[in-house]
Image (cartoon, grey):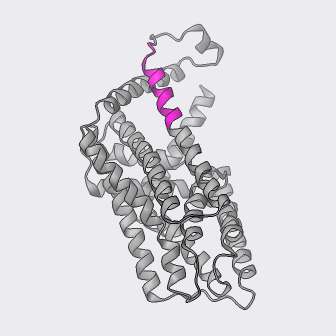
Amino acid sequence: MKRWVLTAVSFAAVIGVSVYAVTSGAPHGVNLRISLLAHVLAFTAFAVEVAARSLKLTLSAKAVRTDLPFTTAVRTSLGGDFGAAITPARMGAEPARFLILAEAGKSAADAMVILYCELFFEMLSLVIVVTGVAVLFPSTGSALLAMVGIVGGYAAFVLGLGTIAVMLARRTIGMEPPGWAHRVRLHGKRWELVQRWFGRVRTTVDAFRQMRLGWATLSLLASVVHIAVRLTVLPAIVYTMTDVFVPTAPLVDWPRGIIFGAAVVPAPGGGGAVELAFRAALHDAIPPDAFAASLVWWRFYTFYIYIAFGALVAGNTALRAVREAEEMEEELERA
């Protein structure tokens, strides 16, 4: 119950901060209209991004010697987006994706390795895209440092997760919990959960080591496309609204950093941090008469539209995954 109250409060804060960011950035009146062409370009970018990300999941499954239908990959991607949006620090993303894969018939081990492949290829493609953007659109030091910091943090998380998995896969655990496990209350049902988890980690590591490089390369290319195309949303909106020269670098540098940076914000939906960061980073780059509409519609096509489609295609499953994760936490606390 407390989590849903936090979600409601957070989204109320998002709305309040959005109103502030929009009105303060438009001293001559708020105009939120954009052209039909801007809507078409932004929606196309959304559709291509979802398709490329879903294709990445399908190709990642092939790379680890299993199959994942494209339609299931679409539900997995959008369901994860919905689960991420309604939970603090995007914690509901992976439980939602995992449950969607499980209900589609994937084993726990297959689901884990597919999801880790997604994280791994996301890390590599981020490095590729950020490097390409830095070469094509030289930017200010602050924007570049922000992107390097985001990519570095994400890479550290993914590689650290993989390193821990490899170390755990090498360990052998018995049926009875050792002394150290008793000291940290890992016994009974908790130890059974640890045993199952260790088994899945070993299977995941083995599958990752035996990855087929051809399919993996195609998955990486799809990942590069899905990240790169998301950077086109803001330029598409801004350049169809104004004839004033606007440098491209801040329009492609800051949005990705803001989107990824929002993942570390505890409040669901970013709690208004995204809007404040957008205003601070791009207030001087986007003309005043185009700023309000740019912020509102960029946020819609990079966040709210994913919630809407995620709720439509897998909302019930994502909500059930979040509830099951909460129930498991409570059960472990009582064990």
Q: Residue at x 72, y 80 (%)?
A: 25
Total count of labels: 0
Residue 234, x across and y down, in percent: 53, 73
Q: Residue 169 magenta-drawn?
A: yes
Q: Residue at x 48, y 89 (%)?
A: 35
Q: Quick check: 106 above or below 334?
A: below
Q: Residue at x 42, y 69 (%)?
A: 46
Mark yes or no: residue 287 visible.
yes
Viewer-proximal residue among 260 and 188: 260
For this view, does 319 lie left or right of residue 267? Answer: left
Q: Residue at x 49, y 66 (%)?
A: 231
Q: Quick check: 132 above or below 154?
A: below
Viewer-proximal residue among 16 and 23: 23
Q: Quadrant of the C terminus?
A: top right
Q: Quick check: 62 above or below 130?
A: above
State the extent of the magenta-drawn residues as a range: 159-172
Viewer-proximal residue among 308 and 270: 270
For this view, does 235 lie left or right of residue 117? Answer: right
Q: Residue 36 magenta-drawn?
A: no
Q: Quick check: 108 above or below 92?
A: above
Residue 213, x across and y down, in percent: 27, 39
Residue 314, x across and y down, in percent: 40, 58
Residue 268, picture quadrant: bottom right
Mark yes or no: residue 1 visible.
no
Magenta span: helix, strand or loop, mainly? helix
For this view, does 18 lie left or right of residue 41? Answer: right
Residue 137, x across and y down, in percent: 52, 66
Viewer-proximal residue among 165 and 90: 165
